[in-house]
Amino acid sequence: MNKLLKIGFLGGGKMAQAMAKGFISAGLIKGENLTASFHPADIQSIDAFKTFGAKTFTENKPVVEKSEVIFISVKPSVVSTVLSEVKSISSGKLFISIAMGITIKEIENSLATDARVIRVMPNTPALVTCGASVYVRGSKATDSDAQLTKSLFDAVGICEEVTENLIDPVTALSSSGPAYVYVMIEALADGGVKMGLPRDLAYKLASQTVLGSGKMVIESGRHPGQLKDDVTSPAGCTAAGLAVLEENRFRYAVIGAVEAATKRCKEISEKSK
């Protein structure tokens, strides 16, 4: 990938910061080739982008003018307003949207007819180059655009192509998923503390256990149930712990969380139309 690629962010919140830092950490772009626009009051985000060496603006047009690839990373409620400001200079540009609930068709209708659009659903672990993202091609997006998008997000984790109808469940699973996992880590650590472990050690062990378990699933290619069985000896301590999780409907609660989040995503998508 061309390291001189010029990338801009329309909106510089937490997710934009995670991606920008991840792209820089992965060596895909230099900070001085980044631009981003902000609400004038968002001093914290402006300062964060300045630490990357990025150029910051409180207007949107300079970002589009100076960039080859523009990320739409503002709140969904202001996407149409922001895009209306840059429509006249959007011709021939690639726009990558991470705005939840805003369809490719809506974005394409808000830009020049030859602007290319790709919709991405990332998650915040991109900040530590361990993200899980998917992307959907717009009607004008080329194979090169898709490959560029995949390369960017593969560099900060994994990235898969999907159809747009899968975006809501993906959001509920991998975008919201870190919050569920953080609760799991906190609960594991609380259990360790209850049994006498120092809290710092409990958090470290719980976090590494979750990290290692995920890596085992990905790298072994084995079903999670098989890996669970490897750890579970007959009448052992793991079996006793799993029995409590099953009694308290742990897996059904997690399934329900993804289902509820998906439904909420769909509600938000409908309201934005």
Image (tube, rainbow, N blue to C red):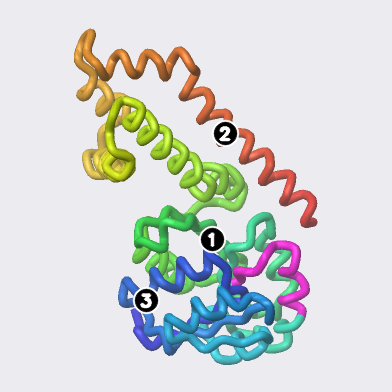
Q: Is residue 258 left or right of residue 201?
A: right
Cα separation, mark 3 vs mark 2, equals 33 Å
Residue occupying the point 20% across, 23% down:
230
Q: Quadrant of the C terminus?
A: bottom right
Q: Label 2 is placed on what type of residue?
A: Ala
Residue 252 is labelled as none
Residue 257 is labelled as 2
Query: Dot 3 surroundings within 10 Å: few (below 14), some, or many (20 or more)?
Result: some
- Earlier-in-chain disc, 2 versus 1: 1
* Res 151 → quadrant: bottom left
Label 1 SS: strand
Q: Label 1 is placed on what type of residue?
A: Val
Instruction: Kindly identify which residue carries mark 1.
Output: 120
Query: Dot 1 surroundings within 10 Å: few (below 14), some, or many (20 or more)?
Result: many
Residue 5 visible in this rendered orientation of the protein: yes
Instruction: Kindly identify which residue carries mark 3.
Output: 24
Magenta segment: 72-84
Residue 127, percent across and down? 41, 63
Q: In the image, which is nearer the foreground, mark 2 or mark 1?
A: 2
Q: Are dots 3 and 1 in contact, CB under 8 Å?
A: no
